[in-house]
Image (cartoon, coloured by chain):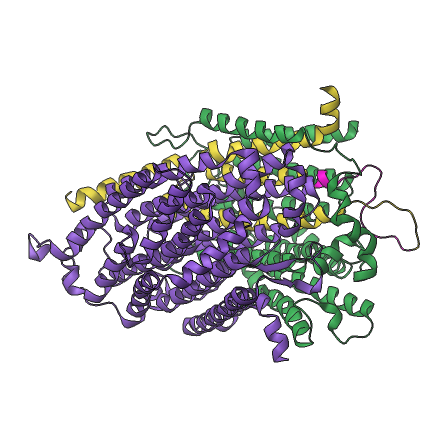
Amino acid sequence: MIANIIENIPGLVVLIVIIAASLIPLVGKSRPVLAWGIAVIAAFLSFIMSLYILNVVMTTGKIRYWFGNWEPPWGIEYVFDPLSAFVLTLVSFVGFIVLVYAKKSLEAEIDPERITYFYALYMLFIGGLMGVVATGDIFNLYVFLEIAAIAGYALIAVGRRREALMASFTYLILGTIAAAFILIGIGYLYMATGTLNIIDLAVILPEIYQSKVVLIAFAFFTVGLSIKIALFPLHNWLPNAYTYAPSVTSIVMAAIATKVGAYVLIRVMFTVFGPEFELTVVHVTEVFLVLSVVAMIIGSVLAIAQTDIKKMLAYSSIAQVGYITLGIALMNVTGLTGSIMHILNHAIMKACLFMVVGAIVYRTGITHIHDFVGLGKKMPYTMAAFTIGALSMIGMPLTVGFVGKWYLTLGSLEAGMWYIIPVILVSSLLAVGYLWRLLDNIYFKQPENASELKTVKAKEAPLAMLIPTCVLALLCIVLGTFAYLPISIAEEAAKVLLRY
Amino acid sequence: MIMDIALLLLVVICAIVAIQMKDLLSAVIVLTVYSLLMAVIWFVMDAPDVALTEAAIGAGITTILFIAVLSRTRRGETEHNTKVRRFSPRAGLLIVVAFGAMLAVGTVDMPDFGDPHAPAHTHLAERFVEMGYQETASPNLVTAILICYRGVDTLGEVIVVLTAGMGVILLLRTTSRRKQLTNNDGYKPIMCSYYDRADKTTKVVKGEIIRKVVARLSIPFIQIFGLFVIAHGKVSPGGGFQGGVILATSIILFTMAFGMEASRKRLAQWKTDVLNVTGALVFLALGLVCILFGGKFLEYTVLPLGCDMWTNKIAITVAEFAIGITVAGIMITLFIETAKRDDK
Amino acid sequence: MMEFILGKYNYLVCILLMMIGFYAMIAKENLVKKVIGLNIFQTAIFLFYISVSYMEGATAPVVWQGQEGVLYGNPLPHVLILTAIVVGISMTALALGLIIKIYQEYGSIEENRILELNQLEEEQNLKRAGR
């Protein structure tokens, strides 16, 4: 019996989150605390299971779990290779730790009667993203992508200000266009190959690389996914969505929603179509290279222009997505390793930064950076976590941000594209620019008029919020200092993807 | 073929009219015609299951939701000359033409329409058609794939509906209300809050008796038909989704005839809330029971219910009813949350 | 050329419908119109899938017991589209729920009017803060 359950862990890791989501409205109807309890337990179990899966994958290799024991390609299977196990662990970890943080933050930001359903949708959002990462069937991927997307729209729309509604609607329209493009891509692929299983597709496609149907399918996949990851110039939905959403939604969206999009992009480009296709048939890497470079610069410049901290972090996300796609465009193991490391870095560091913003909102209600004067003294631990997250975003050595950028730099050299390096440097310097302005306000600036100070009543964030924030800040350092473990997984994943 | 082309032409006309109409109610009605024509086309193309679903969901529920929304917002499309302009129509046209051109390029290498030797028919589909009945005991191959081979997709589908239902509840069900804004676009408010009017017993509205009698007479038949469609999903076109929607329409009809309050008295809010998740939980439990009996998730044949054929039949029926419950619950919830009045 | 059109007319009509829906989604200012466009767009994709599944001379994929040699249509795209229709109504329902909320908050369902209101509010906030 126990052995049988262990055998089913690859399926249960996603299902348990969905089961929790379905139970929450029943159990937590009048008591949001119960809803929170179920959510935390399920997310924690799911995280443990994903660690187990990661361990098994790294020691014994790929796991394939056949649902209903129907052999693929006829049935649907979950496939775990190093990349999907890695991203799955990341998603379930962030999902769990944000949930710990969410309790206090939601009590302050959401109507009490809405909290139960918020948790249910939160779990569906996480479950949808995990299903996307785990699945080995391209249509199943679409279905779970939509679960996450619909839950995401609702989670954004309950923000405190009315702008949240319009931000959510804009995201809904663009997200639906993206999903429709992906659906068209799936239809074209099915028409050309007759299959939906990713592994099966990878076998069949090389024979028909020259078919225009396949070419157009690829184009629609990439454009659709570029909208989902907010790659410049398709990033319009992102800043408002992150800014006006409740803090908890901002954290979890910024940390993992775009990362899972990037995962799907990598999966489609390297596993479904194969690196051969990009190198010999479509030459899409140049396009990605240019867009990445532009996104890295423009995103940072726009971030400098912002005075609202959430909007600033949102624009910096657009720049960070540029780093991830840069690694994809380099098409070598080092670059791709850098890209995967940057997924890790951005998930942890952005979650940490947005958590700090949530804590500031919880204590003072301000988001305008000019109002932050004096926060350094009032909330020392929270601000220390912020500083570490900021350093990781800049890419200081000994933080996890450095590892990603280092591998991207090496990858550019390996690909003979030395001119990428100054771009990485400039983008990092721009990041120093906007983050310094914040840190200067927080720590050094003296208030001109003490009575107008908006941070007078601020005090340290409650422990339930502070601990998750500090754990993430510590992880930024630990994973950056002892980078061996994540790098070995990322490198293994990159090798599998590039078929070495 | 002439028939096909005529239908397709009609659909295109409907689509253009639907997006060009200034009066949104008319646009929605044209959209309904579009959906119904689509259902006819799919029926002609041998896809009765999909046609039934589109008729019930695309032409049915969607229209009701649209009209409910229009009655709570406004009916006309008005032009605003503002400095904020996100997107000029000309740029939109350019993008759309590029989009269409790309898709059209893809058709060059496509197999001809209706070609039986196309790759789509020769790889996966062959086994489904040849072995589907033996392996799942469901003569309707669509149901066989839906519940058995691709059961997780269907579970995901139930979860999608559940997500939407919860999302709408999260958005619209709240006690703290803001002031109501009045319509000022020159159109009369639609149906003058139709669903409320039935509540006011003092003022007899013309045709009210007919409405109530017709509703009373037809609701039992609609519900029996819904249950039939669910239970018969494995033998004939239909199944949990279509049947669930049909069940929901009976409640919607009741609400239209007797008013929101009467409907809520019969089917309280907590009941639909429970229905919403019950179906999903039953489906999940069905999968988990298979794990307890030593199989994989949703591997029905491990259940000790006699021979494989019976096990499959029972499991499919349970799954269909689970789907039906959630779909019916959510569709009722969606209708009530969108159509209810804000203030009295 | 004629042969091409006769062989592929169904796909071409799908593409035309997708273009119409897509256009309404990006170029119309009215939010309800955008959702109408969304519906047209999605249904057009469904029509494409069903066209892919269509086979000359086949019958609906419901097995007739005791009959041999019947050519059945391809059931797989039907299954996918059943799923996709349900995804479509979910998306529509949520979008419509949002529209109701937007109308309650802004008193308008025209995108440019709402964006203008947002902009005005932002300017006022800045003025009030004295920056």
Answer with left or right where residue B283 lies relative to residue A38: right
Is residue C58 found inside the magenta-colored segment of the image? Answer: yes
Question: Would you say residue A457 is visible in this rendering?
Answer: no
Task: Tell me the shade of chain A.
Answer: purple
Front residue of C27 and B179: C27
Is A84 placed above or below B310 here? above
Is A381 placed above or below C8 here? below
For residue A152, what is the image quadrant? Answer: bottom left
Is residue A175 found inside the magenta-colored segment of the image? Answer: no
Q: Which chain is yellow?
A: C
Answer with left or right where residue B14 lies relative to residue A445: right
Answer with left or right where residue B17 lies relative to residue B52: left
Q: Residue furthest bottom?
A: A1
Front residue of A214 and A425: A425
Q: Residue A137: horizontal and vertical position, in percent?
A: 62, 53
Q: Which chain is green?
A: B
Q: Residue A214: horizontal and vertical position, in percent?
A: 62, 37
For residue A113, what is the image quadrant? Answer: bottom left
Q: Residue at x 51, y 40 (%)?
A: A222
Q: Residue furthest left?
A: A449
Question: Would you say residue A350 is visible in this rendering?
Answer: yes
